[in-house]
Image (spheres, grey):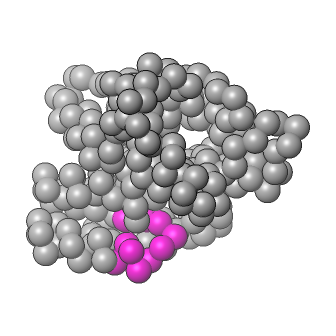
Amino acid sequence: MSSKIVFITGASSGLGEAAAKQLASEGYSLILAARRTERLQQLADELLQRYGAPSYCMELDVRHRDKVQQLISQLPEKWKKIDILINNAGLASGLSSIENGDIDDWDVMIDTNIKGLLYVTRQILPLMIENGGGHIINISSIAGKEVYANGNVYCATKHAVDALNKAMRIELVKYPIKVTAINPGAVETEFSIVRFHGDEERAKKVYEGFDNLVAGDIAEAISFVLSRPAHVNINELTIMPTAQAVAGVIHRK
């Protein structure tokens, strides 16, 4: 095993999968956590074959507090020396004006994007403190910096992530644990498919007519953040496609 271990939530696709591949190529060992175990195992097999990177797969829905506590507490001892936590699990569900919002969608976003991030962080922090340090990377969004029409609750959850990132930076500096937020703009992943409840045609239109970000762009940013020397912390990065000025302004060809 590598001397450094990274724990990635939402690792089975999108930004989490891209981060896993990037970091495996750089020699990290990986704890891959997500709901879709078959995809996790396929990823773990690929990382081992391609990069020789060992992985530990964990079937985990971050919304379930008891399961988060149980699975992290039951990690084998050699996997408990976690150096890096990438809080990547997150989603948007629905795109409606607030008076028409689906309360089930709201609950899913709040439970995943805020509470899930907190549950995982709370369980891993004692391990980092015991190990004498670490680095938490919170994958947020441009929606944590701006609010756009019909994004109400999703934007609220990502504003919460922004606040939590700042709070962690203040409260964990004494250990020392680095804390970084990465705030992407329009990245083409499964994000819009999930937001539109599997409507692939509607999701495809979100990314038409401009060069959007791809998951690998964010994975490279994660790599850069982690490559800084011990005395340097990147508090946050906001990363946009050239064609996107702000959340609601995209120049389409």
Horizontally, is 240 left or right of 194 in the view?
A: left
Q: Position of residue 133 (x, y in %)?
A: 32, 40
Question: Where is 187 relative to 77, above or below?
Answer: above
Q: Position of residue 33 (x, y in %)?
A: 43, 65
Q: Is residue 119 visible?
A: no
Q: Is residue 12 visible?
A: yes
Quadrant holding the N terminus: bottom left
Q: Nearer the viewer, residue 217 or 79?
A: 217
Residue, x 22% and y 23% (percent of image)? Answer: 231
Question: Where is 186 relative to 86, above or below?
Answer: above
- Magenta stretch: give its range: 32-41
- Residue 78 quadrant: bottom left
Question: Where is 95 relative to 13, above or below?
Answer: above
Residue, x 60% and y 69% (percent of image)? Answer: 67
**Residue furthest to the top:** 245
**Residue furthest to the right:** 99
Q: Nearer the viewer, residue 91 or 87?
A: 91
Q: Nearer the viewer, residue 122 or 36?
A: 36
